[in-house]
Amino acid sequence: MLENNKLPLFIITGASGTGKSTVVPYLREMLDHFDVFDIDVISEDVGDWQKLKNVWLKVASNIAKSHRMTVLCGTIMPWDVEKCDTYQDFSHIYYLNLHCDDATREIRLSKRGWSQELIEEHKIFAKWLLENAEKAYSPPMPIVESNSNVHEVALNIKNWVLNVLDN
């Protein structure tokens, strides 16, 4: 688990509409020895997406200095994380793709008032994540389906985190 006294960072990523924000309170309850954040809670305040990711990695780095681990939930890609000032502060950064089918995504994003064009863009991005989970991520990024109830989704994520730590 510890490499050079560094801790890992866990990132739950995925296209919009998969339930990343929805699962946060459940993960906080199930992973009470972790700090779990929805990165979108300050996105409007920060504005710049790269700056937002840099801020969250700094937060996670400071938490790690207190010997606690962090789970960040939000659309975060490895190439954005690698640009962050505190990228090297972690022993490893693990990614999990939270995914839902296109019909579910469309319903969820339509309820938010998203345009059909933007919904289609996120369907394409979701497909890209599925197709590149093994190529663009090291280790390959596992996928958790979020079509079931949120408690089951959170349990699957918790089991993934604990399994990573056990290996």
Image (spheres, rainbow, N blue to C red):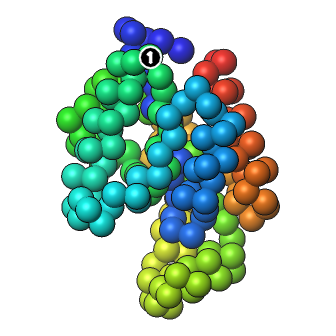
Q: Position of residue 163 (x, y in %)?
A: 68, 27
Specify whether 133 is left or right of 162: left
The residue singled out by tag 1 in the image is: 67
Taking the spot 39% from the left edge, 9% from the top edge, the residue there is 5
Q: Which quarter of the figure is the C terminus placed in?
A: top right
Q: Quadrant of residue 89?
A: top left
**Residue 31 pos. (x, y %):** 63, 33
Identify which residue is drawn at 33% across, 28% down: 61
Residue 7, percent across and down? 44, 20
Helix, strand or loop under label 1:
loop
**From where the camera sits, is residue 37 visible?**
yes
Along the viewing direction, whichever of 131 and 8 lies nearer the viewer: 8
The residue at the point 60 percent across, 40 percent down is 28
State the residue lying farthest toward the bottom. Answer: 116
Residue 121 drawn at (x, y percent):
46, 78
Q: Amino acid at mark 1?
A: His
**Left or right of 54 on screen, residue 91:** right
Rendered position, 82 above or below 41: above
